[in-house]
Amino acid sequence: MDEITIREAQKMVDDWIKTYGVRYFSELTNMAVLTEEVGELARIMARKYGDQSFKEGEKHDLGDEMADVLWVLMCLANQTGVDLTEALNNNIEKKTSRDKNRHKNNKKLTS
Ligand SMILES: [Mg+2]
């Protein structure tokens, strides 16, 4: 599959919603759906990396659940006018200027 940029992915989600989804769910509904999807991701993480165990025959797909989270987040970005490419670039810059030495100086991480 071809690589896609975050901006292209936002556009793909928008095209899909306009073609198949009729319209976006309201922002608050999508916020609830995002929470629901994060919960589904947490369920897998707790069972795969944590102390919980899967039920017998239970199917799980970590990548698919992460994609669900990304999908709804992109819906929210589209309907609230957020350009995630710009937001992520700004966020990484902010983290770098704020925390570039913080973690290196954290003895809990380095010892
Ligand atoms: Mg899901």
Image (tube, helix red, strand yellow):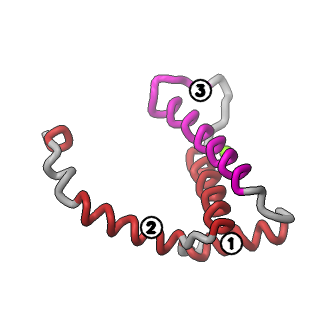
In the displayed structure, 38 sits above or below 9; it is above
Left or right position of 38 against 21: left
Image quadrant where residue 37 sits = top right
Three-letter code, disc 2: Leu
Marks 2/3: CA distance? Answer: 34 Å
Please name which of the two marks, 1 or 2, marks the residue nearer to the observer.
2
Label 3: element kind: loop
Residue 13: x %, y % from top left: 69, 67
Marks 1/3: CA distance? Answer: 33 Å
Magenta segment boundaries in residue numbering: 27-54
> Closest to the observer: 106 or 26?
26
Three-letter code, disc 1: Met
Label 1: element kind: helix
Q: List the residue tagged with mark 3.
A: 54
Residue 55: x %, y % from top left: 64, 23
Q: List the residue tagged with mark 2.
A: 88
Image quadrant where residue 39 sits = top right
Is residue 3 on the magenta stretch? Answer: no
Q: Which mark is residue 12?
A: 1
Please name which of the two marks, 1 or 3, marks the residue nearer to the observer.
1
> Closest to the observer: 102 or 46?
102
